[in-house]
Each structure stands twice: as structure tokens, then as C-alpha cells.
């Protein structure tokens, strides 16, 4: 059966970055289609009628939604190389726990760093740093979250790193100062071609976030 893979995505999306990395880790050729989120395509609305969000992975005409589900789907369908999830059931459960932690905690906390001001921003910044420190503690001295192998938790988190300079600019703090091991992990991940090819330039992301902030946060 032919493998036709299309990804509906938006370039600064840390969620879409996950799916791009997973496809490249598996060596899967895919067609990337950039979405205008202010004017969503009929295909996006047809393929994700419930949430109407990117990323949408379309495999042979069938949609798979939600980035962490997409990454696991890719791992199961293209199981011949670079396993993303560990084979041990307990280790697999742990990886899913931390990917879920990132999904439940990171997005809201990071948004408060760049999209609010005053007391709300200070509280958001404190919460965000605490989440990063929790993740750094889980990473420990391992090269990757799962140990020696790049895997699900790394893929779940690494896209946020392209937004780190934005958080630092608008939150007025240094992530490297707070979490040096986490920044060393980011640098290690970026040595992988699959990651480097899938992540946008953080400077470009900061320009995009500056534009968003000017809309969300009145001076």
C-alpha cells in the first residue's frame, strides 16, 4: 500500500514540531502544508472537525489528531527504525506520564510568561520555572529523558525550546541560569538532524511572539 502522508501545520507550533520530528526520525517522506489559522482550510476543518486545530496528520486519506497521539501512531506504523517509545511496558508508561505532564502543564504556564503582565505574569513565570525545574530533575544526568535513546518525552518538550528566547525577553529571566542541564539537553537534541530540520529559528519565533504580545497585552 502506498504511503501518502500529509501534515497540516503552522510553522511556530511546538505541537506540530513534534510530528515533524517523529516523521523525520522514521525517515517518512511527507507533504508539509502550512495553515493560516485565521483562515483555516476546508481540508483542516474536514479532517479535524472536533477541535479544528493543527497539527493534523493525514495518512492515506485518514486523519490522526493531537500531536502526542500522532507521534505514537507514527512509532507504531513505522516500527522498523528509531523506536520512539521504549519496549519495556513500565518505561513506556513513564514516558507517557511525562509527555502528559508537559501537555497539561507547559502550555498554559508558558503563555502567561509572554501574554500577560504585572502580577499575573510574575505568578506565571514562577509556575513556569517550577515546571522546568521539575523536568530538569527528571532528566537528571541522563543524555535524554529516556536514558541513552532520544524518545517520546524529548520530542514532546523540545519544540518549546524555540520559544525560550521569547520567554526570557518578556519574562526578564534566564532559563540557562535557572536550568543549566535542561539547556545542555536542548543543545544535544539540536545536534540531531531530525530535530534541527524540524525546528524554526528562535529569533523568527520571538518576532512572531512580539507581534502576538502587542495584540494580547495592551501597553
Image: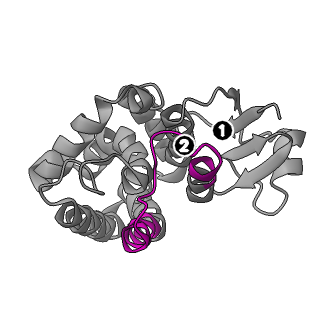
The label number, if any, that marks residue 194 in the structure image: none
- Quick check: is 101 in the magenta stretch? yes
- Name the residue at 34% across, 46% down: 150
Mark 1 lies on residue: 9
* Badge count: 2
Question: Looking at the magenta stretch, what is its main secondary structure?
Answer: helix
Judged left or right of residue 22, residue 116 is: left
What segment is highlighted magenta in the picture?
A: 73-102
Q: Where does residue 26 sit, x and y in percent of width and height?
A: 53, 36
Quadrant that contains the N terminus: top right
Where 10 sits versus 56, above or below? above
Q: Where does residue 126 sit, x and y in percent of width and height?
A: 24, 68
Where 95 sits versus 48, above or below? below
Judged left or right of residue 55, residue 163 is: left
Q: Could you say whether the residue bearing mark 1 is in a helix, strand or loop?
A: strand
Judged left or right of residue 38, residue 97 is: left
| Quarter of the rendering containing residue 48 | bottom right
Asked if one can make out residue 82 in the rendered structure from this viewpoint, the answer is yes
- Quick check: is 108 in the magenta stretch? no
Where 138 sits versus 198, above or below? below
| Quarter of the rendering containing residue 127 | bottom left
- Name the residue at 71% across, 42% down: 37
Mark 2 lies on residue: 13
Q: Residues within 10 Å of mark 2 (few under 14, many from 20)?
A: some
Amino acid at each position: 500500500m502506498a504511503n501518502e502522508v500529509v501534515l497540516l501545520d503552522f510553522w511556530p507550533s511546538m505541537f506540530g514540531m513534534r510530528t515533524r520530528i517523529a516523521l523525520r526520525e522514521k525517515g517518512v517522506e511527507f507533504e508539509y502544508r502550512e495553515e493560516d489559522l485565521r483562515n483555516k482550510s476546508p481540508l483542516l476543518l474536514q479532517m479535524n472537525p472536533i477541535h479544528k486545530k493543527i497539527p493534523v496528520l493525514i495518512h492515506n486519506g485518514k486523519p490522526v489528531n493531537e500531536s502526542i497521539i500522532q507521534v505514537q501512531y507514527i512509532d507504531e506504523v513505522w516500527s522498523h527504525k528509531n523506536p520512539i517509545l521504549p519496549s519495556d511496558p513500565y518505561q513506556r508508561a513513564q514516558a507517557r506520564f511525562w509527555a502528559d505532564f508537559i501537555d497539561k502543564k507547559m502550555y498554559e504556564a508558558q503563555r502567561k510568561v509572554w501574554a500577560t503582565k504585572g502580577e499575573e505574569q510574575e505568578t506565571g513565570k514562577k509556575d513556569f520555572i517550577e515546571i522546568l525545574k521539575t523536568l530538569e530533575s527528571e532528566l537528571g544526568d541522563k543524555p535524554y529523558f529516556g536514558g541513552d535513546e532520544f524518545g517520546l518525552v524529548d520530542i514532546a518538550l523540545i519544540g518549546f525550546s524555540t520559544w525560550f528566547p521569547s520567554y526570557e525577553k518578556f519574562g526578564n529571566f534566564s532559563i540557562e541560569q535557572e536550568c543549566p542541564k535542561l539547556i545542555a539537553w536542548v543543545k544535544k537534541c539540536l545536534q540531531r538532524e531530525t530535530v534541527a530540520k524540524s525546528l524554526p529559528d528562535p529569533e523568527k519565533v520571538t518576532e512572531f511572539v512580539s507581534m502576538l504580545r502587542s495584540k494580547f497585552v495592551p501597553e
